[in-house]
Protein backbone atom coordinates (compact mmCIF):
# COMPACT_ATOMS: atom_id res chain seq x y z
CA UNK A 1 0.00 0.00 0.00
CA UNK A 2 2.84 2.38 0.86
CA UNK A 3 4.62 1.72 -2.44
CA UNK A 4 1.38 2.12 -4.38
CA UNK A 5 0.77 5.49 -2.74
CA UNK A 6 4.29 6.67 -3.56
CA UNK A 7 4.07 5.45 -7.13
CA UNK A 8 0.76 7.27 -7.67
CA UNK A 9 2.49 10.65 -7.27
CA UNK A 10 6.27 10.25 -7.72
CA UNK A 11 6.81 14.03 -7.80
CA UNK A 12 5.42 14.47 -4.29
CA UNK A 13 6.85 11.36 -2.68
CA UNK A 14 10.16 11.24 -4.55
CA UNK A 15 11.53 8.22 -6.39
CA UNK A 16 10.01 5.28 -4.59
CA UNK A 17 11.98 2.31 -3.44
CA UNK A 18 11.67 -0.73 -5.71
CA UNK A 19 11.57 -3.96 -3.66
CA UNK A 20 12.48 -5.95 -6.76
CA UNK A 21 16.12 -4.81 -6.45
CA UNK A 22 16.35 -5.04 -2.64
CA UNK A 23 18.96 -7.14 -0.91
CA UNK A 24 17.43 -10.43 0.25
CA UNK A 25 18.30 -13.64 2.10
CA UNK A 26 21.87 -14.02 3.39
CA UNK A 27 23.26 -10.70 2.05
CA UNK A 28 20.38 -8.86 3.76
CA UNK A 29 21.21 -10.54 7.07
CA UNK A 30 24.92 -9.73 6.75
CA UNK A 31 24.26 -6.10 5.80
CA UNK A 32 21.82 -5.74 8.72
CA UNK A 33 24.40 -7.07 11.20
CA UNK A 34 27.03 -4.76 9.70
CA UNK A 35 24.72 -1.75 10.02
CA UNK A 36 23.91 -2.68 13.63
CA UNK A 37 27.59 -2.89 14.57
CA UNK A 38 28.56 0.35 12.81
CA UNK A 39 25.55 2.45 13.85
CA UNK A 40 25.55 1.48 17.51
CA UNK A 41 29.34 1.74 17.77
CA UNK A 42 29.24 5.23 16.29
CA UNK A 43 26.31 6.09 18.56
CA UNK A 44 28.12 4.97 21.72
CA UNK A 45 31.34 6.78 20.76
CA UNK A 46 29.32 9.84 19.78
CA UNK A 47 27.51 9.85 23.13
CA UNK A 48 30.88 9.76 24.91
CA UNK A 49 32.15 12.68 22.82
CA UNK A 50 28.94 14.62 23.51
CA UNK A 51 29.94 14.79 27.18
CA UNK A 52 33.15 16.52 26.08
CA UNK A 53 31.20 18.79 23.73
CA UNK A 54 28.85 19.73 26.56
CA UNK A 55 31.76 20.76 28.77
CA UNK A 56 33.51 22.62 25.96
CA UNK A 57 30.37 24.51 24.94
CA UNK A 58 29.55 25.41 28.54
CA UNK A 59 33.12 26.69 28.97
CA UNK A 60 32.82 28.72 25.76
CA UNK A 61 29.52 30.27 26.89
CA UNK A 62 30.92 31.03 30.37
CA UNK A 63 34.25 32.34 29.02
CA UNK A 64 36.28 29.43 30.39
CA UNK A 65 38.69 26.95 28.78
CA UNK A 66 37.12 23.61 29.65
CA UNK A 67 38.88 20.19 29.60
CA UNK A 68 42.24 20.58 27.84
CA UNK A 69 44.83 18.41 29.62
CA UNK A 70 43.79 14.84 28.82
CA UNK A 71 44.88 14.27 25.26
CA UNK A 72 45.07 16.89 22.54
CA UNK A 73 42.52 19.60 23.40
CA UNK A 74 40.94 17.28 25.98
CA UNK A 75 39.86 14.67 23.41
CA UNK A 76 40.70 11.80 25.76
CA UNK A 77 38.66 13.23 28.64
CA UNK A 78 35.61 10.99 27.90
CA UNK A 79 37.89 7.92 27.90
CA UNK A 80 39.40 9.00 31.23
CA UNK A 81 35.94 9.56 32.72
CA UNK A 82 34.76 6.16 31.49
CA UNK A 83 37.83 4.42 32.91
CA UNK A 84 37.32 6.18 36.24
CA UNK A 85 33.68 5.04 36.42
CA UNK A 86 34.62 1.47 35.56
CA UNK A 87 37.25 1.44 38.31
CA UNK A 88 34.95 2.91 40.98
CA UNK A 89 33.39 0.74 43.66
CA UNK A 90 29.82 -0.47 43.13
CA UNK A 91 27.75 0.45 46.19
CA UNK A 92 24.43 -1.14 47.14
CA UNK A 93 22.35 0.52 49.88
CA UNK A 94 21.25 -1.88 52.63
CA UNK A 95 17.60 -0.90 52.30
CA UNK A 96 17.50 -1.07 48.48
CA UNK A 97 15.64 -3.82 46.61
CA UNK A 98 18.72 -5.17 44.83
CA UNK A 99 17.20 -6.95 41.76
CA UNK A 100 15.27 -3.89 40.58
CA UNK A 101 18.09 -1.58 41.74
CA UNK A 102 20.40 -3.34 39.25
CA UNK A 103 17.75 -3.68 36.51
CA UNK A 104 16.66 -0.02 36.51
CA UNK A 105 19.73 1.45 34.72
CA UNK A 106 19.41 -1.21 32.02
CA UNK A 107 15.73 -0.39 31.48
CA UNK A 108 16.68 3.24 31.01
CA UNK A 109 19.76 2.56 28.88
CA UNK A 110 18.55 -0.05 26.38
CA UNK A 111 15.43 1.75 25.01
CA UNK A 112 17.49 4.90 24.48
CA UNK A 113 19.77 2.99 22.09
CA UNK A 114 17.36 0.82 20.13
CA UNK A 115 15.01 3.71 19.26
CA UNK A 116 17.60 4.94 16.74
CA UNK A 117 17.27 1.71 14.74
CA UNK A 118 14.47 2.98 12.44
CA UNK A 119 15.97 6.40 11.63
CA UNK A 120 16.97 6.69 7.92
CA UNK A 121 20.32 8.47 8.02
CA UNK A 122 21.45 8.50 4.36
CA UNK A 123 20.40 7.73 0.78
CA UNK A 124 20.23 4.05 -0.24
CA UNK A 125 23.46 2.43 -1.42
CA UNK A 126 23.60 0.27 -4.53
CA UNK A 127 25.70 -2.90 -4.20
CA UNK A 128 26.30 -5.95 -6.36
CA UNK A 129 23.70 -7.80 -4.23
CA UNK A 130 21.02 -5.09 -4.56
CA UNK A 131 20.03 -1.79 -2.93
CA UNK A 132 20.73 -1.43 0.79
CA UNK A 133 18.50 0.95 2.77
CA UNK A 134 20.41 3.18 5.18
CA UNK A 135 18.54 2.41 8.38
CA UNK A 136 19.15 -0.50 10.70
CA UNK A 137 15.49 -1.59 10.44
CA UNK A 138 13.41 -0.15 7.62
CA UNK A 139 10.01 -0.93 9.15
CA UNK A 140 6.79 0.60 7.75
CA UNK A 141 5.70 1.82 11.20
CA UNK A 142 8.93 3.56 12.17
CA UNK A 143 7.35 6.54 13.93
CA UNK A 144 5.02 4.36 16.01
CA UNK A 145 7.99 2.16 16.93
CA UNK A 146 9.89 5.19 18.28
CA UNK A 147 6.92 6.34 20.37
CA UNK A 148 6.43 2.85 21.77
CA UNK A 149 10.07 2.10 22.63
CA UNK A 150 11.01 5.56 23.91
CA UNK A 151 8.11 5.46 26.38
CA UNK A 152 9.68 2.42 28.08
CA UNK A 153 12.53 4.53 29.49
CA UNK A 154 10.27 5.95 32.18
CA UNK A 155 10.04 2.51 33.80
CA UNK A 156 13.77 2.48 34.46
CA UNK A 157 13.62 5.90 36.09
CA UNK A 158 10.61 5.07 38.28
CA UNK A 159 12.12 1.74 39.37
CA UNK A 160 15.43 3.45 40.14
CA UNK A 161 13.66 5.89 42.45
CA UNK A 162 11.53 3.24 44.16
CA UNK A 163 14.12 0.46 44.52
CA UNK A 164 16.66 2.79 46.17
CA UNK A 165 14.34 3.13 49.19
CA UNK A 166 15.41 6.76 49.47
CA UNK A 167 12.82 9.51 49.77
CA UNK A 168 14.79 11.89 47.55
CA UNK A 169 15.20 9.21 44.88
CA UNK A 170 11.51 8.35 45.07
CA UNK A 171 10.48 11.99 44.66
CA UNK A 172 12.83 12.34 41.69
CA UNK A 173 11.40 9.22 40.06
CA UNK A 174 7.82 10.39 40.59
CA UNK A 175 8.62 13.81 39.17
CA UNK A 176 10.28 12.28 36.14
CA UNK A 177 7.43 9.87 35.42
CA UNK A 178 4.82 12.64 35.69
CA UNK A 179 6.90 14.91 33.45
CA UNK A 180 7.60 12.33 30.75
CA UNK A 181 4.01 11.11 30.61
CA UNK A 182 2.71 14.68 30.42
CA UNK A 183 4.94 15.82 27.57
CA UNK A 184 4.90 12.53 25.67
CA UNK A 185 1.26 13.19 24.78
CA UNK A 186 2.02 16.65 23.41
CA UNK A 187 4.98 15.33 21.41
CA UNK A 188 2.90 12.60 19.83
CA UNK A 189 0.06 15.00 19.04
CA UNK A 190 2.47 17.48 17.43
CA UNK A 191 3.84 14.73 15.19
CA UNK A 192 0.31 13.85 14.02
CA UNK A 193 0.41 17.00 11.86
CA UNK A 194 3.38 15.47 9.98
CA UNK A 195 1.45 12.25 9.51
CA UNK A 196 -1.53 14.23 8.17
CA UNK A 197 0.69 15.84 5.57
CA UNK A 198 2.55 12.69 4.54
CA UNK A 199 -0.29 10.21 4.94
CA UNK A 200 2.15 7.64 6.29
CA UNK A 201 3.90 6.55 9.51
CA UNK A 202 7.00 5.27 7.70
CA UNK A 203 9.97 7.57 8.33
CA UNK A 204 11.37 6.77 4.88
CA UNK A 205 8.07 7.84 3.30
CA UNK A 206 8.06 11.06 5.36
CA UNK A 207 11.55 11.90 4.07
CA UNK A 208 10.47 11.19 0.48
CA UNK A 209 7.38 13.38 0.89
CA UNK A 210 9.57 16.30 1.93
CA UNK A 211 11.82 15.74 -1.09
CA UNK A 212 8.85 16.42 -3.36
CA UNK A 213 7.13 19.26 -1.45
CA UNK A 214 9.76 20.88 0.77
CA UNK A 215 10.75 20.57 4.40
CA UNK A 216 7.89 20.36 6.89
CA UNK A 217 9.32 22.96 9.27
CA UNK A 218 7.67 25.84 7.34
CA UNK A 219 4.16 24.44 6.67
CA UNK A 220 4.11 22.87 10.18
CA UNK A 221 5.93 25.58 12.15
CA UNK A 222 3.72 25.42 15.25
CA UNK A 223 3.91 21.63 15.25
CA UNK A 224 7.70 21.82 15.17
CA UNK A 225 7.72 24.25 18.10
CA UNK A 226 5.50 21.95 20.21
CA UNK A 227 7.57 18.91 19.26
CA UNK A 228 10.84 20.67 20.09
CA UNK A 229 9.67 21.86 23.53
CA UNK A 230 8.24 18.42 24.34
CA UNK A 231 11.52 16.79 23.27
CA UNK A 232 13.43 18.92 25.76
CA UNK A 233 11.03 17.81 28.50
CA UNK A 234 11.17 14.15 27.42
CA UNK A 235 14.95 14.07 27.67
CA UNK A 236 14.92 15.78 31.12
CA UNK A 237 17.10 18.62 29.88
CA UNK A 238 17.08 22.21 31.06
CA UNK A 239 14.84 24.07 31.49
CA UNK A 240 12.93 20.85 32.33
CA UNK A 241 15.43 18.93 34.50
CA UNK A 242 13.06 18.73 37.46
CA UNK A 243 13.89 15.08 38.32
CA UNK A 244 17.44 16.07 39.30
CA UNK A 245 16.88 19.50 40.90
CA UNK A 246 20.11 19.28 42.92
CA UNK A 247 19.10 22.03 45.33
CA UNK A 248 15.95 20.15 46.32
CA UNK A 249 16.45 16.42 45.68
CA UNK A 250 20.25 15.98 45.82
CA UNK A 251 20.57 14.03 42.54
CA UNK A 252 17.02 12.77 42.08
CA UNK A 253 16.42 9.18 41.11
CA UNK A 254 20.14 8.29 40.85
CA UNK A 255 21.14 9.58 44.30
CA UNK A 256 22.08 6.09 45.52
CA UNK A 257 23.82 4.95 42.32
CA UNK A 258 27.56 4.81 41.74
CA UNK A 259 30.16 3.73 39.16
CA UNK A 260 28.87 2.46 35.79
CA UNK A 261 25.24 2.15 36.91
CA UNK A 262 25.35 5.88 37.60
CA UNK A 263 26.94 6.50 34.19
CA UNK A 264 24.29 4.47 32.37
CA UNK A 265 21.64 7.06 33.24
CA UNK A 266 23.74 9.80 31.65
CA UNK A 267 24.47 7.65 28.60
CA UNK A 268 20.71 7.13 28.29
CA UNK A 269 20.10 10.89 28.54
CA UNK A 270 22.56 11.71 25.76
CA UNK A 271 21.30 8.81 23.62
CA UNK A 272 17.77 10.19 23.98
CA UNK A 273 19.09 13.59 22.91
CA UNK A 274 20.56 12.04 19.75
CA UNK A 275 17.34 10.16 18.96
CA UNK A 276 15.13 13.21 19.58
CA UNK A 277 17.40 15.37 17.41
CA UNK A 278 17.40 12.75 14.64
CA UNK A 279 13.61 12.56 14.83
CA UNK A 280 13.27 16.35 14.51
CA UNK A 281 15.60 16.27 11.51
CA UNK A 282 13.62 13.44 9.90
CA UNK A 283 10.12 14.80 10.55
CA UNK A 284 10.65 18.51 9.94
CA UNK A 285 13.99 19.10 8.17
CA UNK A 286 13.94 16.61 5.33
CA UNK A 287 16.04 13.90 6.97
CA UNK A 288 19.07 13.19 4.77
CA UNK A 289 17.72 15.36 1.93
CA UNK A 290 20.14 17.93 0.47
CA UNK A 291 18.24 21.22 0.03
CA UNK A 292 18.03 22.92 -3.34
CA UNK A 293 18.60 19.85 -5.50
CA UNK A 294 16.83 16.68 -6.65
CA UNK A 295 20.09 14.97 -7.56
CA UNK A 296 20.26 13.10 -4.27
CA UNK A 297 16.68 11.82 -4.62
CA UNK A 298 17.08 10.01 -7.94
CA UNK A 299 18.87 6.76 -8.88
CA UNK A 300 21.50 5.54 -9.49
CA UNK A 301 22.32 5.25 -5.77
CA UNK A 302 26.07 5.81 -5.75
CA UNK A 303 28.55 5.96 -2.90
CA UNK A 304 28.95 9.71 -3.46
CA UNK A 305 25.22 10.28 -2.83
CA UNK A 306 25.41 8.08 0.25
CA UNK A 307 28.39 10.02 1.65
CA UNK A 308 26.97 13.49 0.93
CA UNK A 309 23.50 12.73 2.28
CA UNK A 310 25.04 11.19 5.40
CA UNK A 311 27.15 14.33 5.88
CA UNK A 312 24.07 16.58 5.59
CA UNK A 313 22.12 14.41 8.03
CA UNK A 314 24.97 14.55 10.57
CA UNK A 315 25.26 18.34 10.13
CA UNK A 316 21.54 18.80 10.85
CA UNK A 317 21.82 16.41 13.81
CA UNK A 318 24.77 18.31 15.28
CA UNK A 319 22.84 21.58 15.01
CA UNK A 320 20.05 20.28 17.25
CA UNK A 321 22.52 18.73 19.69
CA UNK A 322 24.21 22.12 19.94
CA UNK A 323 20.77 23.65 20.52
CA UNK A 324 20.22 21.29 23.46
CA UNK A 325 23.49 22.39 25.04
CA UNK A 326 22.98 26.06 24.21
CA UNK A 327 19.57 26.06 25.92
CA UNK A 328 20.97 24.27 28.99
CA UNK A 329 23.53 26.99 29.66
CA UNK A 330 21.21 29.88 28.77
CA UNK A 331 17.77 29.40 30.33
CA UNK A 332 16.88 29.00 34.02
CA UNK A 333 14.97 26.01 35.35
CA UNK A 334 11.17 26.01 35.45
CA UNK A 335 9.38 25.58 38.74
CA UNK A 336 7.62 22.25 38.95
CA UNK A 337 4.14 23.80 38.90
CA UNK A 338 5.12 25.82 35.82
CA UNK A 339 6.43 22.69 34.13
CA UNK A 340 3.21 20.75 34.65
CA UNK A 341 1.03 23.73 33.79
CA UNK A 342 2.92 24.25 30.54
CA UNK A 343 2.43 20.61 29.60
CA UNK A 344 -1.25 20.20 30.46
CA UNK A 345 -2.68 23.74 30.18
CA UNK A 346 -0.69 25.07 27.22
CA UNK A 347 0.98 22.45 25.02
CA UNK A 348 -1.72 19.77 25.14
CA UNK A 349 -4.66 22.08 24.23
CA UNK A 350 -2.44 23.80 21.67
CA UNK A 351 -1.45 20.51 20.03
CA UNK A 352 -5.07 19.30 19.88
CA UNK A 353 -6.24 22.59 18.38
CA UNK A 354 -3.35 22.48 15.91
CA UNK A 355 -4.35 19.00 14.72
CA UNK A 356 -7.89 20.25 14.03
CA UNK A 357 -6.63 23.35 12.20
CA UNK A 358 -4.04 21.43 10.16
CA UNK A 359 -6.47 18.65 9.28
CA UNK A 360 -9.08 21.18 8.20
CA UNK A 361 -6.54 23.11 6.12
CA UNK A 362 -5.24 19.94 4.41
CA UNK A 363 -8.81 18.83 3.65
CA UNK A 364 -9.76 22.26 2.28
CA UNK A 365 -6.66 22.48 0.07
CA UNK A 366 -7.28 18.97 -1.28
CA UNK A 367 -10.91 19.84 -2.02
CA UNK A 368 -9.73 22.94 -3.90
CA UNK A 369 -7.32 20.66 -5.79
CA UNK A 370 -4.27 22.70 -4.85
CA UNK A 371 -1.29 20.76 -6.27
CA UNK A 372 1.29 19.36 -3.86
CA UNK A 373 4.03 19.05 -6.44
CA UNK A 374 6.55 21.83 -7.05
CA UNK A 375 5.14 24.36 -9.57
CA UNK A 376 5.67 28.02 -8.64
CA UNK A 377 9.35 28.97 -8.91
CA UNK A 378 10.38 25.70 -7.30
CA UNK A 379 7.75 26.01 -4.54
CA UNK A 380 4.72 23.80 -3.93
CA UNK A 381 1.46 25.85 -3.69
CA UNK A 382 0.20 23.39 -1.05
CA UNK A 383 3.38 23.88 1.00
CA UNK A 384 3.23 27.67 0.65
CA UNK A 385 -0.43 27.90 1.69
CA UNK A 386 0.17 25.86 4.87
CA UNK A 387 3.27 27.94 5.59
CA UNK A 388 1.34 31.21 5.45
CA UNK A 389 -1.32 29.72 7.73
CA UNK A 390 1.38 28.74 10.26
CA UNK A 391 2.94 32.20 10.16
CA UNK A 392 -0.45 33.69 11.00
CA UNK A 393 -0.87 31.17 13.84
CA UNK A 394 2.63 31.99 15.13
CA UNK A 395 1.79 35.71 15.28
CA UNK A 396 -1.46 34.97 17.10
CA UNK A 397 0.23 32.62 19.56
CA UNK A 398 3.48 34.38 20.42
CA UNK A 399 2.63 38.05 19.85
CA UNK A 400 -1.03 38.45 20.78
CA UNK A 401 -1.81 35.59 23.19
CA UNK A 402 1.44 34.86 25.00
CA UNK A 403 3.35 38.16 25.10
CA UNK A 404 6.12 36.50 27.11
CA UNK A 405 3.91 35.48 30.04
CA UNK A 406 2.87 31.87 29.54
CA UNK A 407 6.00 30.34 28.02
CA UNK A 408 8.52 31.87 30.38
CA UNK A 409 10.40 30.34 33.34
CA UNK A 410 10.14 33.68 35.18
CA UNK A 411 6.35 33.96 34.84
CA UNK A 412 4.41 34.41 38.07
CA UNK A 413 0.73 33.75 38.71
CA UNK A 414 0.48 37.02 40.65
CA UNK A 415 -0.84 40.12 38.95
CA UNK A 416 1.35 43.27 38.75
CA UNK A 417 -0.81 44.90 41.48
CA UNK A 418 -0.22 41.95 43.85
CA UNK A 419 3.52 41.98 43.13
CA UNK A 420 3.68 45.75 43.87
CA UNK A 421 1.77 45.20 47.14
CA UNK A 422 4.19 42.46 48.24
CA UNK A 423 7.17 44.66 47.41
CA UNK A 424 5.70 47.53 49.41
CA UNK A 425 5.14 45.21 52.40
CA UNK A 426 8.70 43.92 52.16
CA UNK A 427 10.10 47.47 51.96
CA UNK A 428 7.99 48.49 54.98
CA UNK A 429 9.29 45.60 57.06
CA UNK A 430 12.88 46.36 56.08
CA UNK A 431 12.39 50.00 57.06
CA UNK A 432 10.84 49.06 60.40
CA UNK A 433 13.67 46.64 61.14
CA UNK A 434 16.29 49.25 60.35
CA UNK A 435 14.61 51.83 62.57
CA UNK A 436 14.31 49.31 65.39
CA UNK A 437 18.07 48.69 65.24
Image: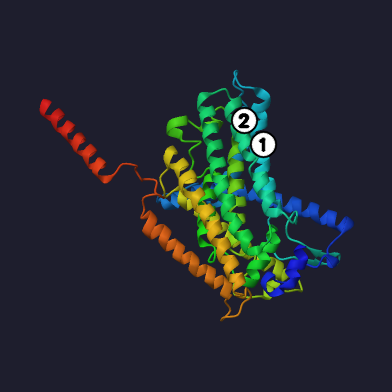
The one nearer the camera, 337 or 57, is 337
Residue 361 seen: yes
At 61% from the left and 60% from the top, the residue drawn is: 194
Determine whether, in the image, residue 338 is placed left or right of residue 175: left
Position of the N terminus, as image quadrant, is: bottom right
Give the colour scheme of this rendering. Answer: rainbow
At 73% from the left and 57% from the top, the residue drawn is: 135
Mark identifier at residue 107: 1
The one nearer the camera, 73 or 375, is 375
Determine whether, in the image, residue 65 is placed left or right of residue 370: left
Q: Where does residue 85 sit, x and y in percent of width and height?
A: 60, 35
Q: Where does residue 201 sit, x and y in percent of width and height?
A: 68, 57
* Number of dots carrying numbers: 2
Residue 48 seen: no
On screen, 257 above or below 305?
A: above
Classify mark 1: helix, strand or loop: helix
The answer to whether the residues at label 1 and label 2 have Cβ atoms under 8 Å apart is: yes
Determine whether, in the image, residue 189 is placed left or right of residue 391: right
Q: Where does residue 193 sit, x and y in percent of width and height?
A: 59, 59
Mark identifier at residue 24: none
The one nearer the camera, 314 or 423, is 423
On screen, 328 above or below 378?
A: above
Residue positioned most to the top: 94
Position of the C terminus, as image quadrant, is: top left
User: Which of marks 2 and 1 precedes in the sequence?
Assistant: 1
The one nearer the camera, 351 or 313, is 351
Mark identifier at residue 159: 2
At 18% from the left and 31% from the top, the residue drawn is: 429
Task: Name the image quarter holding residue 79.
Answer: top right
Q: Where does residue 241 sit, x and y in percent of width and height?
A: 49, 41
Crowdedness of circle 1 by 10 Å Cα count: few (<14), some, many (20+)?
many
Amino acid sequence: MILATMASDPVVYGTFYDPAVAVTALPWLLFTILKMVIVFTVLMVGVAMLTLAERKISAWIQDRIGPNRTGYGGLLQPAADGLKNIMKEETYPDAAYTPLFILAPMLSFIPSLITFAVIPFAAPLSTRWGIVEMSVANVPIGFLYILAISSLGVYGIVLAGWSSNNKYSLLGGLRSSAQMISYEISMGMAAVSVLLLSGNVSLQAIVQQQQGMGWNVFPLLIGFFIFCVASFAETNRLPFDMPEAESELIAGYHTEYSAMKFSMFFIAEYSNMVTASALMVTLFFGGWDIPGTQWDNLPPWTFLKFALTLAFFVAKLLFFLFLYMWIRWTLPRFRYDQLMSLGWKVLLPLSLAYIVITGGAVLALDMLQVPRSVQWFGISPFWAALGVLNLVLAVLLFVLLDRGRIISPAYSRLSPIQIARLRAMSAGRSLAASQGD
